[in-house]
Image: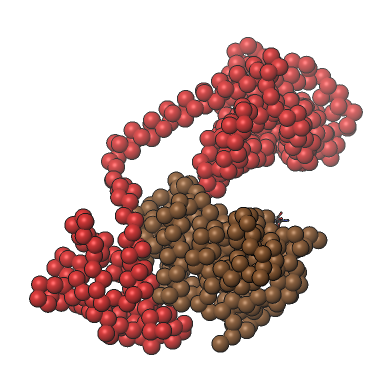
Amino acid sequence: MPAKISVHKLTMAYGPVVIMRDLDFEVNEREIFVIMGGSGCGKSTLLRHLVGLMEPSEGCIFYDSNNFTATTIEERARFIRRFGVMYQWGALWSSLTLGENISMLIEEAGQQSPKTVRDLVAYKLSLVGLAGYEDYYPAQLSGGMKKRAGIARAMALDPDILFLDEPSGGLDPLSAKRLDDLILHLRDSQGCTIIIVTHELASIFGVADTALFLDPVTHTQGALGNPKHLRDHSENPAVRLFLNRGLTPIPAS
Amino acid sequence: MPNTIHDGAKNNSPPCASWRLEDQSVLLELSGDWHRGGPDVTTIGNSSGRSADRYDVQKLGAFDSMLPAFLLAHLRAHPLPSGTTPSFEGLPLNLCGLLKLALAVPEEIGAQITKPVSRAARLGKLSLKAWKSTLDVIEFVGQCSMSMGRLICGRARFRKQDLWLSVQECGIEALPIVTLISFLIGMILAFVGNAQLTNFGANLLVADLVAIAMVREMGVVMTAIIMSGRTGAAFAAHIGSMNANEEIDALRTSGFNPFDYLVLPRLLALVIMMPMLTIYSNVVGILGGMMVGSMVGIPTVLFWNETLLSVNLTNASLGVIKSVFFGAAIAVSGCMQGMRAGRSSAAVGQATTHAIVAAITWVVVLDSAFAAIFTLLNI
Ligand SMILES: Nc1ncnc2c1ncn2[C@@H]1O[C@H](COP(=O)(O)OP(=O)(O)O)[C@@H](O)[C@H]1O
Ligand SMILES: [Mg+2]
């Protein structure tokens, strides 16, 4: 089976400023893939490249062995329809209620009876612990609630690939735990591939199959592999430091 | 992977949920493929007001979120007595996990209840709102005056660069549009005047008409309307989005007075620049009239002399005096709508609209008041 996503020699830059160079990794189907690194190292930027909001300055991205970078706009739109994206700050549409934020996508995707749409919206909001908040506007929610609502919207159409940008930042421990459970259940029941940007060590060790560490000093890929393995055995001291919260990094053996 | 979405492969047998009562327990049999966009769900039998005790998924095909959404809606509609947890016996493990997760946080009730309101209540609310917004205006003007007071005592703190930036925004950068509009207004006045006055052979009086109309009314009113749309709206949008991002709260908690810091420089800039723009607009308007005059055969020198005769200091200062008040009204409308805006991008758009409407309304209302006062005073 070909990799769901593969990234070849990706270099990301804002104008002349290179954020990361020569990223090379693959994400398999039904994998939970974590992108980690200190803040400002380019995690959100990488996500923006993966979903096609920014163009690589070099290298390319493949989805199911199709070149996403070099393809036509129509072809790309076909891929994007299978994505669900949650942005770092929620990016909810502020003039719509939470219910409308989600139902708009469902209605757009095909004819549904109003009851079906209502049930689906209620179900998606329940999954993130926001049952009954259909009629709230985003401005009436707290930061953590906005994030969770953003996740519900990203899941609205049962995407094949779910991109989550710091989903557990600003969540209480219980909500964060429920979110980790949700991610695992989603993968198991719907078989989606999930890409998460996060620095929450608990959730990295709890859910990630593979983790990618972006090294802000060298502007390259710091490490790639299973996070538990990387914590103890990575050759890159920055990675061990990161995964041990800066405490007593165990020397690589 | 029996229970996953098979993209494209929608070998649909229609989704069906059938309820059965078997030795006192409710059995829900699920069958078919549950896909968003597929056929509607058929329900057979009824649950007799209870949630299912057991599930039978022998004939269940592929499903997406449709199935858990359906089950959740039923579970929510028939809540169990508190303390007992619903049974998921017979459901596939992953579905069961999702449902448990969805039920983990109880539904927020009260959120959905939007009571219908009677007409009388709505009218009452509307008038209360109108009264409140009047009070708001008064309060805001009061705050501005206090801010001015602090400025005079030298205790107002704001960045001088902000003042100069605002001066530039509502002065020099407005010149092109003010030039264009004033020149055209001057020309229009001259055309209309000429068409009427030639009938009486008094077409030299076109010069008087243009000059007096420009300096007393048109110059200042047109400038004010341009500035409402240009600068008032910009103030509202800028301050409104600062408000939406909690930047104003950050100013407050950092010990800045948002009035001194945001409103005062804008108010000052507009109050300083409006008179200058008005004088400029008057001159350009008269030049426009003069051009039309020379086209219809009034020599420029004659036109100029006639203009000088008709415009005296009293006349000319009327427009300039008004412009100070108009400038203040525009700045106050813009800043107030910005400061009072809600915390969303839609609210910023509304604030901008309200700012322009309020500013133009205030300009016209004030102008009428001035007209009445000047008539009474015989100027
Ligand atoms: N629009 C932009 N223009 C220029 N540089 C940017 C822009 N957005 C982000 N950056 C820079 O890119 C780097 C990575 O940003 P980002 O991907 O948002 O970081 P994070 O890993 O915290 O998500 C930062 O150093 C930031 O300064
Ligand atoms: Mg980020």
Residue for point 37% across, 60% down: A126
**Quadrant occupied by the C terminus of chain A:** bottom right
Observer-nearest of B367 and B14: B14
Residue located farthest toward the left when viewing the structure as drawn: B23
Res B255 seen here: yes
Ligand 1 image-quadrant field: bottom right
Position of B356 relative to B379 (above/below): below
Res A114 seen here: no
Residue located farthest toward the right when viewing the structure as drawn: B301
Chain A: drawing colour: brown
Q: Relative to A15, is B218 on the left or the right?
A: left
Where residue A210 appears, as percent x and y from the top left, is: 57, 72
Residue for point 21% across, 56% down: B83
Chain B: drawing colour: red
Position of B91 relative to A38 (above/below): below
Where residue B189 appears, as percent x and y from the top left, is: 72, 35
Residue located farthest toward the top when viewing the structure as drawn: B377
Q: Quadrant of residue A87?
A: bottom right
Residue for point 20% across, 70% down: B52
Residue for point 70% across, 27% down: B158
Where residue B94 appears, as percent x and y from the top left, is: 37, 74
Position of A60 relative to B278 (above/below): below
Observer-nearest of A239 and B365: A239
Observer-nearest of B294 and A175: A175
Q: Relative to A172, is B276 on the left or the right?
A: right
